[in-house]
Image (spheres, rainbow, N blue to C red):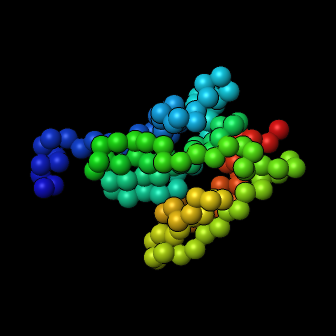
Amino acid sequence: MEIRKFLLGQQEFLQAGQIAEAIRQSRNFDSTKEDPTLAATLLIFQTSYQQTWLVATRERLYCVLDDLKKSFTRVQWSMARDGLISNGQVSVSIATRDKTDRSGLLDIGEHKGWLFSKKLFADTNIESATRGLISQQMLP
């Protein structure tokens, strides 16, 4: 099977800017208020065939899945700014728990159980990185 991938060519993951552009697919995307070129991205999960990203604009937080095996990139869910920010601070509940020695589960508000790769957060914790992403984009 590996030889076949080599001969036929392996599809590559999208880059951060391309992931940000993928939010245009969301039914919640508002082109009058959101600009993917100004969005911030955070890679939270990575295997050889799948990546999961958080993408923050001034208006929404999106979760985008890039899957090479299934040949798609799509928005899994999004949350409006009102559900993330209140009284000038990030108010959404963000929590994690262990799954395996290499992965954990991330909960952001009502969106629970999203895989994250611990190796991506060896130098910082994912809760802080997620809060930072939201505040960077949504707070004045």
- Horizontally, is 47 left or right of 52 in the view? left
Rendering coords of residue 45 (x, y %): 47, 58
Taking the spot 12% from the left edge, 52% from the top edge, the residue there is: 3
Would you say residue 114 is visible in this rendering? Answer: yes
Between 84 and 136, the one lying in front of the other is 84
- Horizontally, is 104 left or right of 135 in the view? left
From this viewpoint, which residue is outermost toward the top?
A: 32
- Horizontally, is 80 left or right of 74 in the view? right
- Horizontally, is 23 left or right of 94 in the view? left
Residue 1: image quadrant is bottom left
Between 98 and 4, the one lying in front of the other is 98
Between 129 and 52, the one lying in front of the other is 52
Taking the spot 56% from the left edge, 63% from the top edge, the residue there is: 112
Rendering coords of residue 49 (x, y %): 33, 54
Rendering coords of residue 28 (x, y %): 58, 36
Question: As displayed, is residue 38 above or below residue 4?
Answer: above
Rendering coords of residue 118 (x, y %): 52, 67
